[in-house]
Amino acid sequence: QVQLLESGGGSVHTGGSLRLSCAASGETSGYCMVWFRQAPGKEREGVAAIYNDGTKTYKASVKGRFTISQDNAKNTLFLQMNDLKPEDTAMYYCAAAVVFGSTARCSTWFTTPRPDFGYWGQGTQVTVSS
C-alpha cells in the first residue's frame, strides 16, 4: 500500500510558475508515476509521467512548459510548471502504479486514466487567472 500526498498548488496569473510535490509513504522506485489533472466538467487526463524504465512523457499542450522529476531517495515526485495558462486550471493528482515492467501498461494508463488502477493522492488545486 502506497499513500501519496500532493502539495504546492495555488493561484497564479498567466505566465506564472508553480512546483507541485508528491510525497510517497513507501518505496516507489520502478513504479509508473503520473501527474493527472481534471478540470470542472472535463475528463481526467494525463499531464506528465515517468515510466517504470525512467522514460518521461508529456501531454502535448504542456511540453516545454512542464517538467516531471523524481527524487527516489526521498520517494518524492515533482512537477515544475512554468508559463502557466488559464487552461491549466484543474485539480492535479499524483498517482503511482505497479506495472510489472510493462512500459506499455504505463503508457496506456497515462493516456486512458483509470481511477480504479494504482494509488492516488487527494489532489492539489491549481488556478491560473488571466
Image (cartoon, helix red, strand yellow):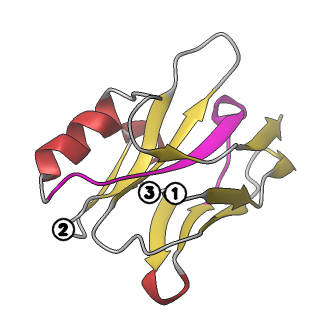
Do tag 3 and tag 1 residues touch (Cβ < 8 Å)?
no
The numbered dot on residue 64 is 3
Which residues make up the magenta segment? 81-100
- The answer to whether residue 61 is above or below residue 70 is above
The image quarter in which residue 14 lies: top right
Q: CA distance from mark 2 to mark 1?
A: 20 Å
Query: Tag 3: Cα neighbours inside 10 Å, few (<14), some, or many (≥20)?
Result: few
Q: Which of 103/83 is in front? A: 103
Q: Is residue 92 magenta?
A: yes
Residue under pointer 2 = 53
- Mark 2 or mark 1: name the one nearer the start of the chain: 2
Q: Which of 66/75 is in front? A: 75
Look at the numbered disc 1 and give the secondary structure of its residue.
strand
- Mark 3 or mark 2: name the one nearer the start of the chain: 2
Q: Nearer the viewer, mark 3 or mark 1?
A: 1
Q: CA distance from mark 3 to mark 2?
A: 21 Å
Q: CA distance from mark 3 to mark 1?
A: 6 Å
* Left or right relative to 95: residue 29: left
| Residue at the front extreme of this rendering | 1
